[in-house]
Amino acid sequence: MSKPILHDALRDSPAASDARQTEAPAGPRCPAGQEMARVLKTQPLRMAADPSSGAIAYWKHDALHDVVRPMADHVVMSYPAGSQRLERRTGKVASIGTARSGVVTIIPAGSTSRWDIHQSLHVVQLYLPHATLARVAGEADTAAPGDLLERTGHPDPITSRLLLSAADALDGSAALDALFRQQLTDLLATRLLSAHAGVPATVQATVGGLAPTALRRAIERLRSDSDADVSLAALATDAGLSRFHFCRAFKESTGLSPHAWLRQHRLEQAMNMLRDTDASVVSIAAALGYSSQTAFAAAFRKLTGETPSDWRRRLR
């Protein structure tokens, strides 16, 4: 019997990638979040799930030496900081990579593998249902997706950056963050189809913006109060388009994605309330749908460079 072949995902050329499709073992598949909690022996620091898209979780876990059982969802991982050796064994094949900024790891739905990680690690994980991947493929007019490829510390700055951006939207304005995650999940699915599927998909370009009536309806929904349904599904349904085509048409019409437009609108609302009223920062944060004053202040500062209190004092 031949010895297992070791592949270094950081040194191999793309043609000699460690990517391998995995046969889906028979038997039940666990929800990805449940299986990760069992293997990592902890709970995520932060997590958010969208029924129409998937879930994003931020973990810090200790050393890992265990077998990951077949899961119902594809799991895509990226690493916000540090550098750590990854060892993965699938059947007779062993893959070695490094968890670091700019790389991704993919566990296809239904696959099983042995993992050895010798030190603690920070990781962001996307749990992507195959149904979401199939929906995005259909909306983007690509071929139906097969299984994703196994990746272990595989260089992909685009996917890594998208996933880490999604992790930033786990604690803030519920409606704003949910819309951001929905957009990013669809973008991630599109990226996975083009870069990490057995047969890379070509996404058809979308030409033209929204019809004036559809654009007006979308903006009216986005302008409505914080309790309104501003999900990507609701916006796309109003326009009579798929989520994929709605996002691209909206950006063609406005120059901004739906999330960026809503974020700008909420910033303008906050500035008006800070300038024109004596309402406390806490009450303004609540009125705009933020989970806390801290989350509101962090979002405001990210866009303006100042805290809400400092901005108000300077203006007055």
Image: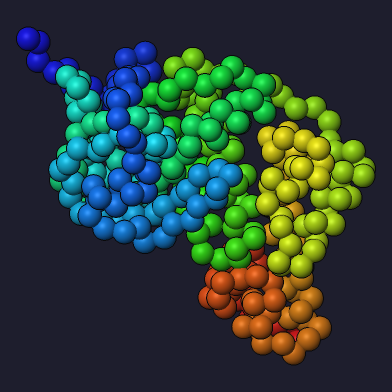
Place of residue 141 in the rendered image (x, y in percent of width and height, measured from the top left): 67, 21
How was the colour assigned to the protein in this rendering?
rainbow
User: Is any atom of residue 256 visible in this view?
Assistant: no
Q: Identify the residue shown where x is 19% and y is 22%.
A: 91
- 146 lies left or right of 96: right
Residue at the left extreme of this rendering: 1
- 286 lies left or right of 130: right
Place of residue 72 in the rendered image (x, y in percent of width and height, measured from the top left): 39, 36
| Quarter placement of the C terminus | bottom right
- Observer-nearest of 55 and 309: 55
- 209 lies left or right of 274: right
Residue 15 figure quarter? top left
| Quarter placement of the N terminus | top left
Q: Identify the residue shown where x is 41% and y is 60%.
A: 46
Q: Identify the residue shown where x is 47% and y is 39%.
A: 128
- Observer-nearest of 156 and 288: 288
Q: Identify the residue shown where x is 50% and y is 44%.
A: 54
* Residue 140 position (above or below residue 259): above
- Observer-nearest of 32 and 212: 32
Residue at the top extreme of this rendering: 1
